[in-house]
Amino acid sequence: LPALAQEATGSGILHTADVDLAYWVYGKPTAETPIIAVNGGPGLSHIYMIQNNVWNRLAQTRQIIFYDQRCTGKSKKVRAGASMDMSAQVVDLEAVRSHFAFSKVDLVGDSFGGFLSMAYAVAHPERVHKLILSDSAPPALKDIVHLLPQVFPDIEEEDEALRKKLRDTNEAAQQQLLN
């Protein structure tokens, strides 16, 4: 069995209007901010994330929640016609946080889970204490809010100026080839 599978202190199914979300609880509530671990995929269950003992060590001092995203692992019961887009995934993550009545969480997002965690942090910034990303690309996909202009507008302006210069240079080079 995976390193952490034997140590779950609880598990269950969270029923929402669109999906039944399976979750696993590790550790007990403490004064430390709880963690919700958001796995990659889409299409993978959370199991690959618990193949080492890092979670065992963290669960000694904090409560950690893993869940299977809609249509993955044990979260397979989805209402016919239910959306699979990022906004639906954000609603699911909020349902998990709300189910445990956590005022704030530390999100650990791996790969696609990083995208989902970033989208959640944009939708619910008041609920996120820390955002930890592993092997996640920057938020530039459809349905993900592009955060760079809000956080670093000066860098965004420099990037746009560079893109314009490159476009102009490329057009001039193409014209020289045609002449």
Image (cartoon, rainbow, N blue to C red):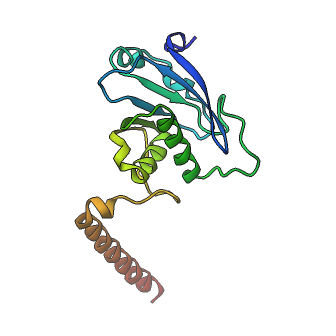
Q: Residue at x 52, y 58 (%)?
A: 143
Q: Residue at x 55, y 51 (%)?
A: 86
Q: Nearer the viewer, residue 13 or 49?
A: 13
Above or below residue 157? Residue 24 is: above
| 14 with respect to 139 (left or right) | right
Q: Position of residue 53 (x, y in %)?
A: 42, 15
- Quadrant location, the N terminus: top right
In this orientation, does residue 112 appear? Answer: no
**Residue projecting furthest to the right:** 80
Give the number of marks: 0
Quarter-of-image position of residue 78: top right
Q: Nearer the viewer, residue 123 or 136?
A: 123
- Quadrant location, the C terminus: bottom left
Q: Position of residue 17 (x, y in %)?
A: 66, 44
Q: Residue at x 40, y 60 (%)?
A: 146
**Residue projecting furthest to the bottom:** 179
Q: Position of residue 114 (x, y in %)?
A: 45, 42
| 38 with respect to 22 (left or right) | left
Q: Residue at x 36, y 42 (%)?
A: 128
Quarter-of-image position of residue 154: bottom left
In this orientation, does residue 35 appear? Answer: yes
Above or below residue 107? Residue 144 is: below
Q: Position of residue 130 (x, y in %)?
A: 32, 39
Above or below residue 155? Residue 132 is: above
| 95 with respect to 167 (left or right) | right
